[in-house]
């Protein structure tokens, strides 16, 4: 049997010490409590959602390297900049795009 601290939130949310179930709390209270109590990688769900809403987490840009029309220099398909030292890396050093996008 799990200890109360290791049990998932919903399994023990509406029992009392004498073992008799009590009325389920309103959904809003349960959801609010879950947002504030459940943690993933040391952060609550509320903190993760706040970061998403604030724009801190952005969708990953995808691009690919292509050879400049002059036939010599590689360029990023997203920002059109050349990589420093003309080295085609996994990420564009200018815009941060991951270089695994479709080559159109």
Image: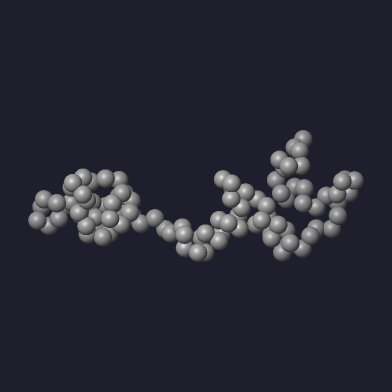
Q: Hey, which residue is sitting farthest top in the picture?
A: 1
Q: Quadrant of the N terminus?
A: top right
The quadrant where residue 69 appears = bottom left
Residue at left offset 70%, top offset 45%? 8
60 horizontally vs 10: left or right = left
Residue at left offset 43%, top offset 59%? 58
Residue at left offset 86%, top offset 55%? 22
Instruction: Point out residue 100 in the picture as x, y percentages from the top left corner.
Output: 31, 49
Tell me if residue 102 can be seen: no
Instruction: Point out residue 72 in the picture as x, y percentages from the top left corner.
Output: 11, 50
45 horizontally vs 70: left or right = right
18 horizontally vs 98: left or right = right
Q: How is the image coloured?
A: one colour
Instruction: Point out residue 64 in the picture as x, y percentages from the top left corner.
Output: 26, 52
Q: Quadrant of the C terminus?
A: bottom left
Residue at left offset 42%, top offset 58%? 59
Instruction: Point out residue 14 in the picture as x, y percentages from the top left corner.
Output: 80, 52
Taking depth in this image into account, of 54 and 19 the one nearest to the observer is: 54
């Amino acid at each position: 049997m799990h200890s109360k601290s290791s049990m998932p939130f919903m399994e023990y949310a509406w029992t009392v010490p004498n073992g008799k179930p009590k009325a389920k709390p309103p959904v809003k209270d349960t959801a609010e409590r879950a947002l504030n109590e459940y943690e993933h990688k040391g952060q609550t769900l509320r903190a993760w959602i706040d970061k998403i809403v604030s724009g801190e987490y952005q969708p990953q840009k995808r691009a690919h390297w292509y050879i400049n029309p002059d036939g010599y220099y590689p360029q990023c398909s997203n920002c059109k900049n050349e990589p420093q030292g003309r080295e085609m890396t996994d990420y564009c050093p200018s815009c941060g795009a991951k270089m695994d996008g479709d080559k159109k």
